[in-house]
Image: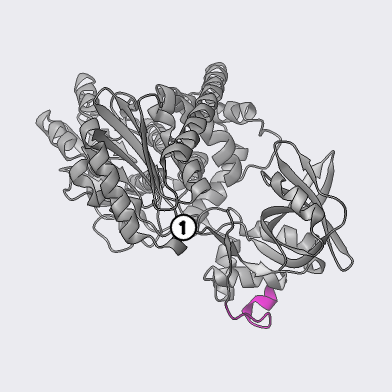
Amino acid sequence: MRSIWEIKSREWSETTWFKGLGLPGVLGKVMSQRGITNQEEAKNFLCPSLANLVDPFVMPQMEKCVERIVQALESREKIMVFGDYDVDGISAASLLYLVLNRLGAEVSYYLPQRLTEGYGLSIEGMEEARRRQAGLVISVDCGMTACEEANYALSLGIDLIISDHHLAGERIPQARAIVNPKFEMEEYPGGELAGVGVVFKIAQALYRRLSLDESELEEHLDLVALGTAADVVPVTKENRILCKFGLEQIAKSNKPGLKALIIKAGLQAKQIGTSQVVFGLAPRLNAVGRLGDAIHSIRLLVTKDESEAYQIAQFLDTENQRRRSLDERTQKEALDMVTASVNLEKEKAIVMASNDWHQGILGIVAARLAESFYRPTILVTFDQEEGKGSGRSIPGFDLFAALRECRDQLVSFGGHRQAAGMNITRDRFDDFKQRFLAVSEERLSANDLIPRQHIDAELSLSEIDEKLVESIELLAPFGPGNMRPVFATNKLSRADFPGIVGNNHLKLRVTQEKAEYDAIGFSLGEWARPIATHRGTFDLAYILENNVWNGQSRIQLRIKDLRLSN
């Protein structure tokens, strides 16, 4: 699918504040486009500090939250941490469990079963808290729409603290405290935290209230980076600071489970950034929750036993291989269904259902279809008359708001602008599909369905050198809100014939005037013949990186998009 190249433009002069930093001028342009406009902001961005984290008590209801937890600590009251089965929820539950355990609490953890309980606080979970004689339940990464479950907890005499980062529904659950940066305040100054980030703020507040040394919490920043990177929240403001130091902590983590996971992912000899978390560590932690019981993942992260850690990591790796097999089969079935039943000329969204899909991998497949066809995509799987669905969106389309307009056809729903889940009965599916397609038709133009390739700056090949590539790494950690810069170079020629390597990857050597560089385009092998037979020049959109092979490091252009000139 051809994309529109959007080259960012903002007035920039290297003679301004940036010149004194001694960095390549193009880096200043990139930083300026990201809202950095003076030297102090640049230094804070390039050299983040834990001292710049926001006071945790700025968050609404933090006082009430900490007061209730301290009361439980002092009275030796049993506490149950209620988590979620994705990496953010697992990391958040692990973090809170370890912190409360360190503070002497009688604490246990609970994760819902995806296949039987679904997302969020559950009646089954509240019953388990009663069996454990827990007087306090603290939810992490969930709870904002759990009104019925909150009321049930109250009926059992259980106090509930909700810590979450999702949007509230039309009704607010009854709880002792609700700690959420999107609740009761216009805008949290620390940005859009993940669920584990909210828990870290609670831990900070607890340590301050108890006059403890907050530096003890730094050993758990590995969990914060793990959940934050995996949840794909903006890597800006507090998330940038937490990820920066958390990724460093992952590399030196003393947690046996995390070390074992790194080995199983083949990352022990590599620098771990957000990409390694998202594509290496997170899928293994997620897989077991998608297919069965996520409790294994939290056991991995909190264990102090190296032998147990290795056994669990091996199990998670095996489950991830099984998950990948299911992914491939479901994706093929979904692609065939799109070809057979979706009119892409007329329909601006994809809504499909099956009786055979595994609900744990619907989100992964929906994301791939949304990317491939550049349309909001919802997939539903039915078991008898009950269906569970997962949706993924494209920029410019608020999936959560769209589902809100379809709520009369749904049993329940929740999520974000870009990702959401839902429950539906079979007899309402057709009505829901037609309503969702109508909402998509109203809110999306034909232009919205054309992918955009954002370009940070245009370069000539002669401007590329080792200093530029090294300087780009100063912008890390990368992620939403601070993506790795994409550059464009026009009127390139091939230095030799292109080839196809690996699984349909384009291998190319490009030249412009006297400069030459290797380029690689993953899954772009179909471009080899057009480039080989094209008589003119071509344009590349790419990111710059060092390719290390056999101990040798060479600058490489990783192709994001390309087009033949004229």
Q: Is residue 337 shown to the viewer in this render?
A: yes
Q: Is residue 66 visible?
A: no
- The total of numbered circles placed on residues is 1
Q: Would you name the residue on which mark 1 appears?
A: 449
Is residue 297 placed above or below 422 in the rendered structure? above
Instruction: Indicate the position of residue 212 as horizontal and vertical percent values.
Output: 40, 44
Q: Residue at x 77, y 62 (%)?
A: 467
| Of 321 and 81, the residue lying toward us | 321
Residue 101 lies in what quarter of the image?
Answer: top left
> Which residue is outermost to the right?
514
**27 relative to 107 in the view: left or right:** right
- Relative image position of residue 436 (x, y in whole percent): 30, 48
The correct choice, above or below, for 69 with respect to 130 in the image is below
Q: Quadrant of the C terminus?
A: bottom right
The one nearer the camera, 559 or 373, is 373
* Residue segment shown in magenta: 10-21
Q: Is residue 24 above or below residue 142?
A: below
Amino acid on which disc 1 is placed? Leu
Residue 342 in percent (x, y) is at 42, 43
Colour pattern: one colour
Residue shown at 35%/55% (left/top)? Answer: 398
Who is closer to the viewer here, 82 or 488? Answer: 488
Extreme residue in the left direction = 155
Count residues near mark 1 (Cα–Cα under 10 Å), then give few for <14, some for 14-19, many for 20+: some
Disc 1, SS? helix
Identify which residue, 200 or 68, lies in the foreground: 200
- Locate residue 431, reporting x and y percent: 23, 42
507 magenta-colored: no
